Amino acid sequence: MLKVGLTGGIASGKSTVSQLFFTLGIDIIDADLIARQLVEPGQDCLDKIIQTFGKKVLLNNGELDRQQLRQLIFSAPEAKQQLEAILHPKIQQQLIIQSDNSSSPYCILSVPLLIEAKMTSMVNRVLVIEIAADEQLKRLCQRDNISHTQALDIVAAQSSPQQRTSIADNIIINNNSPAELNAKVQNMHEKYLELAKTISIGCQ
C-alpha cells in the first residue's frame, strides 16, 4: 500500500486538496479528525488533558474549549509539549491502523504536523502544499477571524516552507485558480496510481 503524507502550512489549502483526492476515490486519513475524536467527552485523552491543565480548558457542556487550549499552548511552550505528549502517540497509532485498512489504490494521510511531529517515517511519499506568504496570512485572518499579528505568530510556530520543501517528494503550489489546483491534483493522482502499481508488484 502506497501511503502519501499530505502536509503544508496553515491555510495553504490542505483540506481542499484532500477533498479533491477523495473525489477521485482515494481514502483520506485525517489527523485533525482523529485528534477531534480523541478529545471528545469520555475519551482517555480528554481526561488526561483535564488532569494536566485543569477544568479551565472545558466548556460548560463538558466539551474541550479549543480556543482556550489554543491560547494556552501558544503562550506556554511547555504546555504545547505536554499536549503533544498526550495526543501524538494516539494520533500516530490511529493513522497507522486506518491507513493499513485502506482499500483504495493508495491512501492520503493528511497530517498538518507531519514534520514537526516527526511522522514522515510512516509514509512512502511526502506531498507538500505551499502558498505565497501574503496570501497565506490573508486566508488565515479571514478563515479564523484573527488579527495579522496573531496569524504571524501561528505561522511562525510551524515548520518553515524551506523545512517542508526539503523533505518533500512532491510539491503543489496553490497560488492560482481552483481549476489549476484541480488539474495539479489530477496529475499527481495519476503519478501515484502508477507508483502504487509498482509497489504492489514489488510486494507479490
Image (cartoon, rainbow, N blue to C red):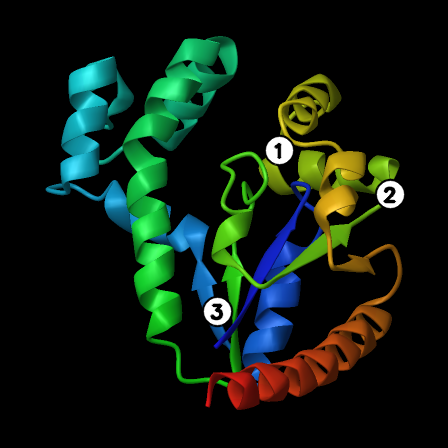
Residue 132 is labelled as: 2
Q: Nearer the viewer, mark 1 or mark 2?
A: 2
- Looking at the rendered structure, the secondary structure element under dot 1 is loop
Depth order, front residue of 70/160? 160
- Report the amino acid beneath label 1: Asn
Residue 115 falls in image quadrant: top right
Q: Is residue 175 above or below residue 100?
A: above
Residue located 74% across and 75% down the image: 188
Percent x, y of residue 181: 80, 69
Determine which residue is flagged by label 3: 28
Percent x, y of residue 61: 17, 34
Q: Say few, some or many: other residues with alpha carbon within 10 Å of mark 2 (under 14 / 14 to 19 / 20 or more).
A: few
Q: Is residue 4 above or below residue 89?
A: below
Evaluate whether residue 111 shows in this view: no
Q: Nearer the viewer, mark 1 or mark 3?
A: 3
Q: Upstream in the sequence, badge 3 or badge 2?
A: 3
